[in-house]
Amino acid sequence: MHAKTDKFIQLALVIAVFGGWEGGIALGVIDPFFFPSPTAIVKQAWTWLSDTSFYQHVYITLTETALGYLIGTGLGVAGGVWLGLSRRSARILDPFIKGFNAIPRVVLAPIFVLWLGLGLWSKVALAVTLVFFTTFFNAMQGVREVNPVVLANARILGAGRSDLLRHVYFPAAASWILSSLRTSVGFAVVGAIIGEYLGASAGLGYLIAQAEGNFNAVGVFAGIIILAAFVLVIDALLDVVENKLITWRPNAQAQATS
């Protein structure tokens, strides 16, 4: 019953926001040059979606996002688990990690363009730097949060280092890692889009940059909405993966509505 009420409230909020937006433009309260009407934005998005060449831009952005996400996640999990287990290595590398993490990622984008050119890999490199630290710190913290009693019992039962990694450390850190994966999706998309925005010949960021250069607010808003839908689809896929991997975790939504 609560779930249906929540859905109704969500729908009412959407209607109120976009209906008020459209009404404000019709009454002349909102300037359509800066805030184009939702109808115009939807028409622009539909025009793009109806054009087969548009999907080449989507494919390029998706490829950059996926590569940056997978590489950044892999490196982040590996580095986080390693330094979570090796406290001495963590102490040695700590100032270097903090120093690199303090660098604004946007500053790195022109450097990657100089090193890797205007092609795919400069965008992937920027996405990797955004994804890496989010996953890295969560994986390291998840490994360090393992219950020492569980570790001691596993060692008493004869578990070796590989057994501990597989049956103790990774399951204990799974919630931490998966929570970072959800956040990292947005960062991977941001990395790809910023790279395309600064210099590219294709991609969704390129389309948004073109629209901005032509003072086309409709195109900018349409690109933002398509990107938001893009991230929501990936987030839904992560929901499926998370439910498959962490079957033991209680369903928080079910507990809240019970």
Image (tube, helix red, strand yellow):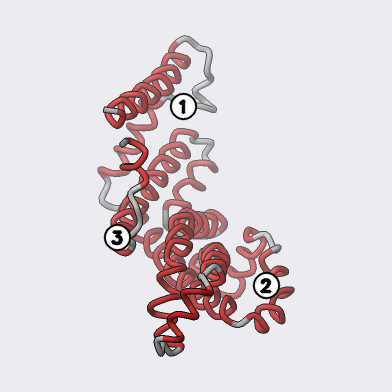
Disc 1, SS? loop
Q: CA distance from mark 3 to mark 2?
A: 34 Å
Lower position in the chain sequence, tag 1 or tag 3? 1
Lower position in the chain sequence, tag 1 or tag 2? 1
User: How many residues crowd mark 3 within 10 Å: few (<14), some (14–19), many (20+)?
Assistant: few
The answer to whether residue 122 is seen in the rendering is no
Q: Which residue: 54% across, 67% down?
A: 145
Disc 2, SS? helix
Query: In the image, 50: left or right of 198?
Result: left
* Nearest to viewer (mark 3 / mark 2): 3
User: How many residues crowd mark 2 within 10 Å: few (<14), some (14–19), many (20+)?
Assistant: few
Look at the image and tell me in which quarter the C terminus lies.
top left
- Tell me the number on the disc at residue 36: 1
- Please determine whether, in this image, residue 209 is positioned above or below residue 156: above
Q: CA distance from mark 1 to mark 3?
A: 45 Å
Instruction: Pick out the residue farthest to the top.
Output: 27
- What residue does disc 2 label? 97
User: In the rendering, at what x and y percent does residue 159 appear?
Assistant: 41, 87
User: In the rendering, at what x and y percent does residue 158 appear?
Assistant: 41, 90
User: In the rendering, at what x and y percent does residue 138 appear?
Assistant: 54, 64
- What residue does disc 3 label? 247
The amino acid marked with disc number 2 is Ile
User: In the rendering, at what x and y percent does residue 51 appear?
Assistant: 27, 46
Disc 3, SS? loop
Q: Are marks 3 and 2 in contact (CB under 8 Å)?
A: no
